[in-house]
Amino acid sequence: MIDCDVLIIGSGPAGYTAALYTTRAGLKTNLYTGVNIGGQLMYTHAVENFPAFDFISGPDLMEKFQHQVKSLGTNIFNEKITHLKCDTYPFEFKTETNQIGQAKTVILATGANAKWLGATNEEKYKGNGISVCATCDGFFYRNKTIAVIGGGSTALYEALYLSHIAEKVYLINRSDIFVGEPILQKQVFNHPKIHVLYHTIVQSFEGDSRLKSINIVDTKTQKRTVLPVNGVFEAIGTEPETSLVHQQILLTPSGHILTDKRTMATSVNGIFACGDVQEDTYRQAIIAAGSGCIAALSAEKFIFSNR
């Protein structure tokens, strides 16, 4: 039987920051990384907006996060939690290697998974020309040609943001209807740098060590075109990873874990959530880390008040 004071599920900025605080508080902390070790930052080629770093790659930043908490004494397990029982106390959990455990408090930092197109060579160019965060990676495409894929508000925002950086922005939508906010549509359609491609899909990504072009198809005419681009930003949405607590914890209409933003408390007393699994507005590492700090402090308070 594995016993711990704090069970942290997830290994992005939120999870590691939570571990930093709970471990320093003298609480036995077990962090399970899950399959996606490091979270979405692992797909970010360069980070220039995280405090104290002029420039660092996403993977290198997450390696520093992990090294810090490991050196403090956080127990890190490179496996995932397959079951979590939220209606018993202490909370019961099971790992993918069939280890059984109990925890006095749980911090959910499972994040959100970016939706991907599934086009040919997509995996090859993730972090090398393909990104899911314009705020994170847009700077590296100054005065270059890029494409944004999507038809919702996120895609419209990304295109507008990137229009201040890039020389030309293609906005690729698989239909002729945009579902984003009307005011954003108006701004996009009237912007001289943004070129909208309707009823168009991306079939493949091409290049050498870096992305150089995309093969696109007009779904109405079936015309195939090679479109030279330096980068692509996929904005077709994200899905919060909540399968572990499905029907056990209250979710928001968007499918994120419902939390009290002052404490990161969920609908289950003693269980907290932080990072993108409960954040549906901003997708920034610093915000995830901050929410991890709040969740950890709240978890500490919960444990100390129940001793």
Image: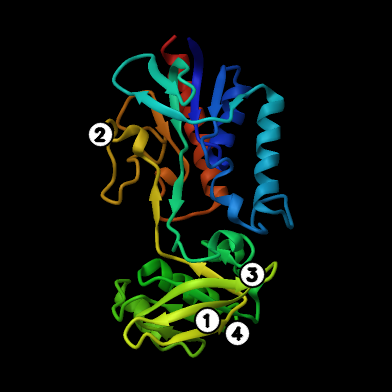
First-in-chain label (4 vs 2): 4
First-in-chain label (2 vs 3): 3
Mark 3, Cα crowd under 10 Å, few <14 / some 14-19 / many 20+, is some
**Residue kind at label 3, given as amino acid type:** Phe
Please tell me which residue is depicted at 53% across the width and 79% down the height of the picture: 163
Q: Tag 2, which secondary structure?
A: loop
Q: Which residue is labeled 2 in the image?
A: 247
**Is there any visible trace of residue 252 in the rendered image?**
yes
Mark 4, Cα crowd under 10 Å, few <14 / some 14-19 / many 20+, is some
Q: Which residue is labeled 4 in the image?
A: 167
Q: Which residue is labeled 3 in the image?
A: 139
Q: Considering depth in this image, is 156 or 117 the residue closer to the camera?
A: 117
In space, the residues marked 3 and 4 are separated at their CA atoms by 12 Å
**Is there any visible trace of residue 280 in the rendered image?**
no
First-in-chain label (3 vs 4): 3
In space, the residues marked 4 and 2 are separated at their CA atoms by 47 Å
Residue 245 coordinates in the image, percent (x, y): 33, 33
Q: Find residue 142 and report its image quarter.
A: bottom right
Q: How many marks?
A: 4
Mark nearer the viewer, 3 or 1: 1
In space, the residues marked 2 and 1 are separated at their CA atoms by 42 Å
Q: Looking at the image, which residue sits at the far right?
A: 54
In space, the residues marked 4 and 1 are separated at their CA atoms by 7 Å
Q: In which quarter of the image is the C terminus?
A: top left
